[in-house]
Amino acid sequence: MKVLLVNGSPHEHGCTFTALTEVAQTLQKEGVETQIFQLGKKPIPGCLGCFKCQELHRCVIDDIVNDFTELAQSADGFVFGSAVHYASATGAITSFMDRAFFSPRRSLYYLKPAAAVVSARRAGTTAALDQLNKYFTISQMPIISSTYWNMVHGFTPEDVRRDLEGLQVMRNLGRNMAWFLRCKEAGAAAGVPWPEKEEQVMTNFHGLQ
């Protein structure tokens, strides 16, 4: 089992990384392989709305998004981490997730567990969490929770390491993710069938009476 953790902060070893590392170390203790995927500081263009990805099953902008979706194929679960900018996720991870969740085949994320982790000096965390969780709910991904909302507080990594409750939330998140993955694996081994799939219906409201 493998969990892919995405660091959406421009700081490679900053506060968000510190939180993700706590999750990753706990997952490793639970026997789950981890990899932290760093978005870095290069600009990430937003979605062009060209819909070419629906034919190609990859984005026409060939950058870090396609690198991620290649890795995501072998991942069993995901944790997406972001700093909080103006009470929302960073612009980089927003552009990244807009494209990473739209461009590949829908089965890439289907019923794979996911969690969002956010880091702020003081506030705006719950709004950023709500934003990120919406990518999961529209993709039929179970959301992994913890003993509080998945957040840490601090202006520096040292501050985050002093946020004892926040770090505990990260550890419990890792344990819950590992437990869910084991349950999913056991269910598959026991022959529990996948949910019945219906053909997707899309309703456009223009012209409806």
Image (tube, rainbow, N blue to C red):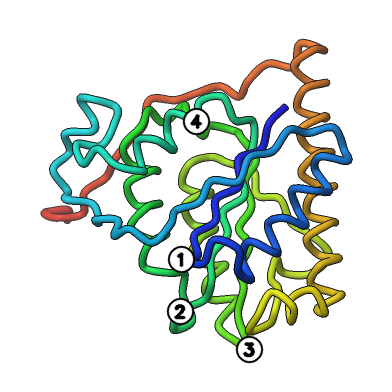
Quarter occupied by the C terminus? bottom left
**Residue where numbered disc 1 is placed:** 10
Q: Earlier in the sequence, mark 1 or mark 2?
A: 1
Query: Is the residue under label 2 in contact with that under label 4 (CB below 8 Å)?
Result: no
Q: Residue at x 54, y 56 (%)?
A: 7
Viewer-proximal residue among 196 and 178: 178
| Gap between marks 1 and 4 measured at Cα | 20 Å
Q: Residue at x 80, y 78 (%)?
A: 163
**Residue where numbered disc 2 is placed:** 85
Q: Earlier in the sequence, mark 3 or mark 2?
A: 2
Q: Residue at x 36, y 42 (%)?
A: 65
Image x and y of residue 93, in percent: 42, 59
Viewer-proximal residue among 185 and 153: 153
Given this view, does label 1 or label 2 mark the residue nearer the observer? Answer: 1
**Residue where numbered disc 3 is placed:** 122
Is 27 situated left or right of 45 in this image?
right
| Gap between marks 3 and 1 measured at Cα | 18 Å
Image x and y of residue 5, in percent: 61, 47
| Gap between marks 3 and 2 measured at Cα | 11 Å
Query: Is the residue under label 4 in contact with that under label 1 (CB below 8 Å)?
Result: no
Circle number at residue 141 = none
What kind of residue is marked 4? Answer: Leu
What kind of residue is marked 3? Answer: Arg
| Gap between marks 4 and 3 measured at Cα | 33 Å
**Residue where numbered disc 4 is placed:** 71
Query: Is the residue under label 2 in contact with that under label 1 (CB below 8 Å)?
Result: no
